[in-house]
Amino acid sequence: MHRKRFTCALAMSLLVSPALYSQHASSRSDASSQMDRDLLEIDVPRLHALYAHHKYTVTQVTQWYLDRIARYNPVYRPVIHVDAIGALAAAAHEEAEKGRHGPLWGVPILIKDNTCITGVITSDGWSGFNIAGKEFIPSTDASIVKNLRAAGAILLGHTNMPDFAASDTNFSSAGGRTGNAYDVRFSPGGSSGGTATALASNLAVFGQGTDTANSIRIPSSADSLVGLLPTRGLVSIAGIAPLDWLLDNTSPLARDVTDAAIALDVMAGDLRRDPLDFRTADRAANAQKLPYTSYLKRGALKGKRFGVPAFILNPVPAAGAAPDRGAVQLAPETREAFLKALDQMRSAGATIVLDGHILTPEFSQLIRAINTRPYRAEGTMAYLHDFGPSSYKTPEQYEAVAGAKFPPMLLGLGTNATPQRTLESDPDRDTTLFGPQQKALAEYDATLARFHLDGFVYPALQMPPNDETPKPGEPQSRGPHSATGWANKIGVPALVLPGGFYANGIPFGMELSTTRWHDGDLLGYGYAYEQATHNRRQPRLTTP
């Protein structure tokens, strides 16, 4: 039987009901202050050490995170659906377990609102999936949620996101606006901005995000987090509401590289093919050997060479592009922050190669030739069929039940309508998708070989996160923007790392990418940079 969960962005009175959160009716106790000192910025290994020494129970830790959501969500609004009942029940169950525990035993986490959790509203950021009595309540867990549960993770609920994950910031018709943890007025980035703000605010140990063009990496940069885009196919996307199923990807966001590596191990699972995600067919043969924590070495950057893509530092608009849809120029203050981060890379032992022939604007033209638009409806239809509520498994059934129009953009219709086809039966798929994809990937790999590079390094964002305070006569914020969506087009792994801060205290993020299936090496590079710099610092949060 499905259980309807608290929708905290819409009904905070439920979230702070006396039965669940009576601790906050009075002043903080000495015990809770000690928990603050122990749990703020904690990672999985240190949390497991606390459990091993019987300092806290899983229920106490889970309640501590639920309390923090109750305290800070009214201001920052990163969490849209809280499953307090399910989380506390899972915690009690784990405490009663005997024998060996999973790698995420007792670890409270958050899941993005486009990723199916059985019995919990999964609204994809859209009010149409959040209509009272007609909510999108999945019939089964997403593949990664099954893996996370099996590993012992405690699912606290869903994080807020923009409608259908189709934005670089975090305005949602279902959950409102999410603010940046470092200054609520500023953008947290999108579309995984809810997860990012929640983690930066210590509302969970780590969280899950999705990335179709840059949606894990933008908010990781904006909130001083580690954000991974894995090799496409390493982690199954089955059970995640598609924006563009041929580009969509999923992975952890975390406060440090160690947690990202531990979480990636679990999300990737046993590497067998997931029948609901054809891209996973190659992972068993190609993925680096797990666990990914084995690649985390302080000296991993020594002797490594990284090139700076010319098309990111000096972007050229696409031919015929509208002025607001062309290449996004690199802001002067972002260029300055990036150069400082490059100096940190050099200090950690890496060689930085600056050459105008490294991924030139012609590379971005190869990327633009990759066309997935004709197949968008296929992904949406499969998602509804496999994971939709029993009451609606097709767009037509949704419209009959909800009395609302199904979003045309999810079916390849609307403003940029494209005649829809089925990938498996399309005779032109090699011309449309696979051929251009292989050509762009070949150029990417050839550049690595030609310059003897281990990877590329570049700013995760082309600009600082922007102040979203409404201004009369000006449109709603759409940024900040990046130039990193190309990584999704060719399926290569990329990793965002805390790279410092701007003068106004908002974070700057640096991004690395490398060869397909070398996710472990990439995490190792990130770990070496993290340990050499310790750039992340905790935000100062405000309450109502």
Image: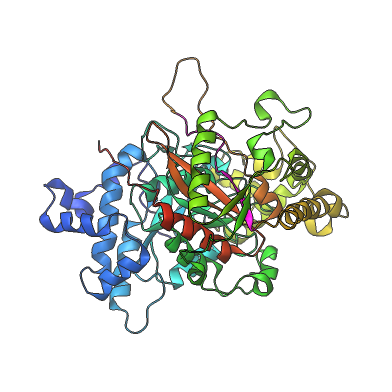
| The stretch drawn in magenta includes residue 455 | yes
Q: Residue furthest top?
A: 473
| Nearer to the camera, 123 or 332 | 332
x and y percent of residue 216 in the render? 53, 49
The extreme bottom residue here reads 99
| Location of residue 120 with respect to 410 vertically, above or below | below
- For image coordinates 58% across by 74% down, the residue present is 289
Could you tell me residue 173's position as x and y percent?
Answer: 48, 36
Q: Position of residue 62 (x, y in %)?
A: 29, 61
- Residue 163 included in the magenta stretch of the image: no
Q: Nearer the viewer, residue 244 or 493?
A: 493
State left or right for residue 190 relative to residue 159: right
Instruction: Name the image colouring.
Output: rainbow
Magenta region: which residues? Answer: 454-466
Position of the N terminus by quadrant: bottom left
Looking at the rendered structure, the number of numbered marks drawn on it comes to: 0
**Residue 114 in view in this figure:** no
The residue lying at 52 percent from left, 57 percent from top is 349
Position of residue 131 measured from the top left corner of the image (x, y, whole percent): 47, 43
Query: Nearest the camera: 42 or 279?
Result: 42
- Image-quadrant location for residue 119: bottom left
76 sits left or right of 218 in the view? left
Identify the main secondary structure in magenta: loop
Q: Is residue 37 left or right of residue 383?
A: left
Res 99 seen here: yes
